[in-house]
Each structure stands twice: as C-alpha cells, then as structure tokens.
Image: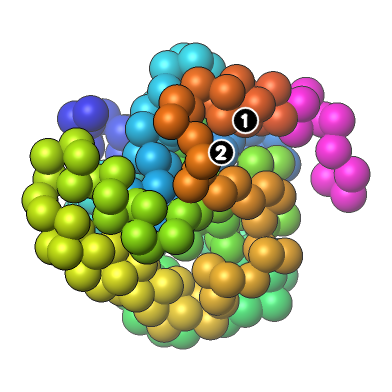
Amino acid sequence: MSHNILSVIAAMAEVATVTHDEPSTRHPKKPVITISRDYGSGGDIIAHRLSQRLTIPLYDEVVLKEIATRLQDDPAIVKMLDEGFGRAKDMWLYRLFSGNDVGPDAYRDTLVKVVMSLGRMGGVLLGRGAHVILQEACALRVRIIGTPEVCAKRMAQSGHGTYDQELAKTREVDHMRGKFVWDVFNSRLSDASQFDIIINTDRMADFEDVVEMLEGMAKAIHAGRVLAL
C-alpha cells in the first residue's frame, strides 16, 4: 500500500489543532491497532486485511520512518504537533505514560510524535515500537509470532527464496526488529506484558479467523469496553 506522505502529515497537523474535547490517544477518531510481528508469521497480511475490514489506514514501518524523517526537516509542523497536546510535548507525555525515556535523539523524538499523532487519528500501525509508545492509549496492541522454521517454510512456499535462505532471513529480521525496540525503547518483544494479545500462527493456514477476532477486539476497545482507560 502506498501513501501520499505529505497528505498524511497534513492530516496529522489538522488533528493536532483541534480542541482538547476532540480526538486524543485515549479517545481516537477511529480504532487504533499496533501490530508487532515475526518475519513470515503472516503479520503483514493480517494487518492489511484488518485495515480493510475496519476501513482505516495501514501505516507500515516504512511509512512511519519516512514521515518521521520528513518531519525532522519541518520544525513548524513538529511544533504544531507539540502544541496539539496542550503544550505538553509528546516526549513528556510519552514519559508520563510509560516511565521510559527514549533519549535525546531527534529521530526517536519525532517518531514518538508521529505515532502519538496517528494514535489520535486511528489506523493500523505496523512495527517501529508503536505498541510501546501507545501502551497507555486506547489501542489494541497485537504481537504475531511463529517459530523460525515454520515462518521460513511459509515464505519459501510463497516463492520468496529457498528454505535455507528464508530461515536465515527470518532469524536476521527478527533479531533486527527486536534490537530496534530495545535500543529505542529499552523494551523486549518477548515481554508479553507489552501486548494485549499474542498470536502464534504456526498452525494457521488461513488468517481470516485471526482478522475477525482482532476486528472484534479493536471495536470493543475503541468503544470504551476496556479497563483503566
């Protein structure tokens, strides 16, 4: 799925200018789902189908990274996003929510702003540690996993490469994703407490049942049927 990055940034800026009674991370306009996934687990497919079911945008890690990178070069938009949270900068809001400090790095600062802003708009956010940033938000935080051997077999059967190639890639990609979340947020993907639901897709040939289940859970959380929010 391709996005017009500038139009997404414009929408983020528009949401940031609304009054405090309007959308926030605790009362987003539409359902918000974060999906962290192992390579070859079907997480990308599930995310795409879920966004279609709920008619909400899908923001993958490439889109999130590009938005954050572009915003770094536009201080005026970043300032607007900051002011949209009632003068409390997103980094302070994030620290208040999570107790974590992502450090002074400009890209990480901007990434938090991006995810917090998208968390007010609604959508499926794929990767980039969005589940950590939105852990106190009205969002369904999902982790899709699979054993390396099964994931590699699934990818090889889909024509992505040989089994041995995909097994090596599975281990490499999963390591890099885990390393990113640890380096940026000091959080482990293996920490089950960081997610609302963890799904092992090893024995699943079709992901429709998973999508249907997550659709119901996302709607319930968005409707307010969740504790401590």
Q: Which residue is painted at 45% across and 26% down in the image?
A: 206
Q: Quadrant of residue 46?
A: top left
Q: Quadrant of the N terminus?
A: top left
Dot 2 alpha-carbon crowd within 10 angstroms: few under 14, some 14 to 19, many 20 or more: many
181 and 5: which is toward the camera: 181
Image quadrant in which you'd find residue 184? bottom left
Q: Is residue 96 above or below residue 150?
A: below
At x 25% / y 72%, what residue is drawn? Answer: 172
Whether residue 96 is in magenta: the answer is no
For the point 67% across and 48% down, the residue is 197
92 displayed left or right of 56: right
Helix, strand or loop status at disc 2: strand
Q: Give the number of the disc on residue 53.
A: none
Residue 79 sits above or below residue 213 on the image: below
Query: Residue beneath label 1, please?
Result: 214
Lower sequence index among marks 2 and 1: 2
**Amino acid, disc 2:** Ile
| Residue matched to label 2 | 33
Q: Amino acid type of disc 1? A: Leu
Q: Secondary structure at mark 1?
A: helix
Q: Nearer the viewer, residue 177 or 81?
A: 177
